[in-house]
Amino acid sequence: MMTAEARAGDELRDLALSALRRAGLLGAEPPTVEPLAGGVSNDVLMVRTAQSAFVVKRALPRLRVAEVWEASAERSYTEAAALRWAHGVAPDAVPGVVTVDRENNVLVIELAPDGYGDWKQQLLAGDVRPDVGTRLGALLAGWHVASASDADVLAEFNDQEAFGQLRVKPFYTVAAERNPEAAPVIATLVERMAGTRVALVHGDFSPKNVLAQPADGGGLWVIDWEVAHTGDPVFDVAFLLHHLICKIIVRPDRRHELMTTAENFVQSYSDRTRTAFRDLDHRYLLAHAGALVLARVDGKSPVDYFSTAQRDEARALALDVLREAPDGLAELWRMTSV
């Protein structure tokens, strides 16, 4: 008997080929179709024709996690619009949108060039290149600054429903519920973030959504813009930073390189945003990073690479950060070395 997952895969395959056919992108030769890892939030396929290769995505209304976690599947349309805008600002840093089937909630985008790899897996394997942090800081700053001065963009992405469903509630709210001692600080962070709507925020600016070339190439792609919204740009900075903190916990042998990557990222971003925004509030940034680390242990989307001891270490660090409010990365690193 065919499983529900297999049926969904077959359905998406048919919809993907139909969308490509209507766009005139299927030739006479049969294409090849392969499933790709879509994380917890999407079904994803790779389609290769004789001429081109594409990624086909369909957002899931219920995410693949142990707990009930639902979100509007219409976030695919948000992703398409955000990709088109981001591509206009930095065309070499995001995939182009090929076509969108709104009726069936199917998004078709370009496949990354050969040689681009998942930065998350590179970091976990110990391949840490601090220059990637520098370049990501510059990219993120470019998108934030460009959107901050574009009233049309800020209006287009003003809906924060998906951000609430995919980030605020499952990360901040659940982590606060499970750690009452941290709840007041987390509530303050959420309130300030909700009241700050000054730039187009990616919403999932994490290593798994960065495709990086090997060291001799240097190219980067930033993918998965489905949580894009007009909001607080500090969230994106904190989101990448908290992932690097988690990698320090799981790869202490690469501690120095990971810390340098984080420092380069924050400095590169800060250098390019001072004229558009106020100086980066490091206490606020690091409090968000602490809340997010806590969420990766006690929220609805825990990281999948911590041991039990590492989860305990991450929780203790996160609670210390939320309680002690470090004023910079140097102080944070001292806390991680305890």
Image: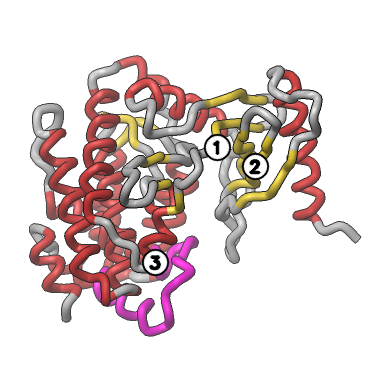
Identify the residue shown where x is 59% and y is 33%.
74
Q: Is residue 216 above or below residue 182?
A: above
Classify 10 Å Cα crowding around label 2: few (below 14), some (14-19), many (20 and above): many
Which quadrant of the structure image shows residue 138? top left
Q: Is residue 292 left or right of residue 14?
A: left
Identify the residue shown where x is 39% and y is 66%.
124
Q: Is residue 176 visible?
A: no
Compare marks 3 and 1 and give the one earlier in the sequence: 1
Q: Main secondary structure of the magenta part?
A: helix
Q: Quadrant of the C terminus?
A: bottom left
Identify the residue shown where x is 62% and y is 25%.
100
**What whole-number distance in Å separates the C-alpha atoms at marks 2 and 3?**
24 Å
- Colour mapping: secondary structure
Magenta stretch containing residue 30, yes or no?
no
Residues at badges 2 and 1 in contact (C-beta under 8 Å)? Answer: yes
Name the residue nearer the viewer: 88 or 291: 88
Name the residue nearer the viewer: 128 or 102: 128
Classify 10 Å Cα crowding around label 1: few (below 14), some (14-19), many (20 and above): some
Per the rendering, the mark at residue 282 is: none
Compare marks 2 and 1 and give the one earlier in the sequence: 2
Which residue is the site of mark 1? 111
**What whole-number distance in Å separates the C-alpha atoms at marks 3 and 1?**
23 Å
Which residue is the site of mark 2? 46
Residue 108's x, y, as percent? 61, 31
Q: Which residues are magenta?
A: 296-318
Which residue is the site of mark 3? 124
Classify 10 Å Cα crowding around label 3: few (below 14), some (14-19), many (20 and above): some
Name the residue nearer the viewer: 291 or 331: 331
Compare marks 2 and 3 and give the one earlier in the sequence: 2
Label 2 amino acid? Met
Mark 1, secondary structure of its residue: loop
